[in-house]
Amino acid sequence: MQNLIDTYPHYVNLQQHKQTNNLLLPRYIHSLRINAHYQLAFIDLLEITSLRNLILSNIPIFHLFHFINAISLEDLEYVYLGVCPDHHESGEKQLKEIQQKILSLGGLKLKKCVFRMKIFADIDQLPIELSSLEYLRIDGCENILIVNKLVDRMPNLRSLYVSILESTQTNDHHIQQNNKHKCLTNLTIRIQDNVSLEQLIPLFDQNGSRVRNLTIKSNSPRDSRSYDQMRDARMVNLPQRITFIINRSLPQLTNFQLRQSVSSQNYSLLQQKFQVPPYVEMIPSSLEHESYRVSIAAPFAFIWQNKT
């Protein structure tokens, strides 16, 4: 019985410990959560040899770099990397190495990877195939071309959550479907105001042949004038644009959500401009698609749904 207790893999959350007094850690740690750099002093790095899940956040890049290079990572199945509090340009080189080392684990056992930050890793330096990765979240990717290069290396990826920061300069949407990518079924994309829906077509064409659930999140401009311009330029033609993109690139899609965030100061404008719930007559649907849902996030949440 004592042997079973000693060798049982444990979950350790160091967030619960403010001091090292009477802190007795198990020998075999299955899951480890560290939420501050001072918690690194609680553990012996050489003893961490059997990790499966690793959650790190609020750790300065220098300490994070030392930690990642000091422990055994080969058996990791899940990695969560939160924002680094002292992130600056001088630390981007180390952050780049950290991200590349973690993503490379997708060629071993890593199934789920979350980066709550911008990605700096050089995609071309990663292994050609990261076959074990099934879930990926990146909260900052330069453009859609970087996303495509990354996803192309993950043939078994099932779910992708990515924030796209900038629009691309190319208008070439004539990309052949990537028939080898048969697993990606859940796709969530957050776009900035300067990224149009049409900019997403290369991703859909190249890696979206099996996507069934699609969510697009977008933030509206802060000032009222910009809101009016956005409404006139985008909202009026939104149904036609969505219908064109989905029917062209994602004919197999069954569930779609468009989430538009509206600031509180624009909420009154929203009420004035729409006497009825917006989009309620404009949600595209057809016999080919089971449902679409469009929602606007405001001080109060509205959700309208249309099913065939």
Image (tube, helix red, strand yellow):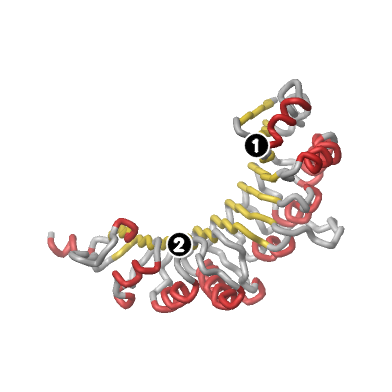
> Considering the numbered disc 1 on the image, is that residue within a helix, a strand or a loop?
helix
Give the residue type that dot 2 points to.
Ser
- How packed mark 2 is, by other alpha carbons closer than 10 Å (few <14, some 14-19, many 20 or more), is some
Q: Is residue 281 above or below residue 74?
A: above
Q: Residue furthest left?
A: 1
Residue at 47 percent of width and 76 percent of height: 62
- How packed mark 1 is, by other alpha carbons closer than 10 Å (few <14, some 14-19, many 20 or more), is some
The quadrant of the image that shows the N terminus is: bottom left
Depth check: give the residue in front, 180 or 290: 290
Q: Position of residue 90 (x, y in %)?
A: 59, 78
Residue at 62 percent of width and 52 percent of height: 184
Give the residue type that dot 1 points to.
Ser
Depth check: give the residue in front, 154 or 140: 140
Give how far apart the Cα atoms at labels 1 and 2 are: 30 Å
For label 2, the residue is 57
For label 1, the residue is 264
Can residue 255 be spotted in the picture?
no
The quadrant of the image that shows the C terminus is: top right
Residue at 38 percent of width and 63 percent of height: 34
> Considering the numbered disc 2 on the image, is that residue within a helix, a strand or a loop?
loop
Q: Position of residue 277 (x, y in %)?
A: 71, 24
Question: On residue 215, which mark appears?
Answer: none
Q: Position of residue 269 (x, y in %)?
A: 74, 31
Give residue 163's quadrant in the image.
Answer: bottom right
Q: Position of residue 216 (x, y in %)?
A: 68, 44
Q: Residue furthest top?
A: 275
Whether residue 212 sits left or right of residue 251 in the image: it is left
Depth check: give the residue in front, 249 or 92: 92
Whether residue 257 sits left or right of residue 233 in the image: it is left
Q: Single out the mark in the foreground, 1 or 2.
A: 1
